[in-house]
Amino acid sequence: MAGKDTCFIKVNGDVIPCPAFYDLKDWHGGNIEKQKLEYIWRDDKTFDELRRFDYANLKGICGSCSHVNKCQGRCPAARARAYNNIKTGPDPACPAEYFQIHA
Ligand code: SF4
């Protein structure tokens, strides 16, 4: 899962949780030309927040959706882009929300 067991290094050295965070500057964990990857991975607030995130605490429509144990709120980058945080759902591409079948 993005930021929990994977990261992605952009050509400029910025470290992000996965390619979906490519344009989300607030979710860039650091830059390997300025810091060791080990430090960024272990201590940066971006990766820390993703590791501490528990989908069971999702807010918004996801908070009362019966599918949450299966989808876990879908893509955190999509939620960050839509709501400026990863704690609110749904992912705008959620088919259950689109078809109103999440209850
Ligand atoms: S609303 Fe969509 S993204 Fe949210 S928990 Fe339900 S199925 Fe998942």
Image (cartoon, rainbow, N blue to C red):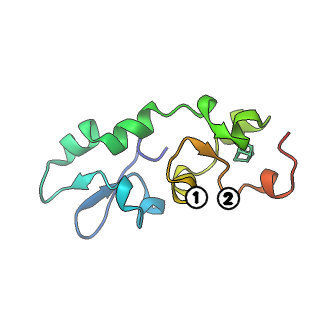
Find numbered disc 2 in the image and state the secondary structure of the residue it sits on: loop
Residue situated furthest left in the rendering: 34
Measured from the top left, where is residue 46 in percent x and y? 35, 45
Marks 2 and 1 sit apart, C-alpha to C-alpha, by: 7 Å
User: Which residue does the numbered mark 1 point to in the structure image?
Assistant: 82
Q: Amino acid at mark 1?
A: Ala
Disc 1 under 8 Å from ligand 1? The reply is no
Is 14 displayed left or right of 88 in the figure? left
Reply above or below: 31 against 67. Answer: below
Is 35 displayed left or right of 14 in the figure? left
Disc 2 packing (10 Å; few <14; some 14–19; many ≥20): some
Residue at x 49%, y 44% (from the top left corner): 1
View quadrant of ligand 1 = top right
Q: Nearer the viewer, residue 59 or 45?
A: 59
Residue at x 22%, y 63% (from the top left corner): 13
Quadrant for residue 33, please give it: bottom left
Quadrant for residue 52, please give it: top left
Is 101 displayed left or right of 59 in the figure? right
Of discs 2 and 1, which sits in the foreground?
1
Numbered badge on residue 37: none
Measured from the top left, where is residue 41 in percent x and y? 28, 42
Is 96 displayed left or right of 77 in the figure? right
Q: Earlier in the sequence, mark 2 or mark 1?
A: 1
Residue at x 59%, y 34% (from the top left corner): 55
Residue at x 50%, y 48% (from the top left corner): 85
User: Which residue does the numbered mark 2 point to in the structure image?
Assistant: 92
Find numbered disc 1 in the image and state the secondary structure of the residue it sits on: helix
Question: Are discs 2 and 1 less than 8 Å apart at CB?
Answer: yes
Disc 1 packing (10 Å; few <14; some 14–19; many ≥20): some
Q: Amino acid at mark 2?
A: Pro
Measured from the top left, where is residue 21 in percent x and y? 44, 60
Reply above or below: 60 against 13. Answer: above
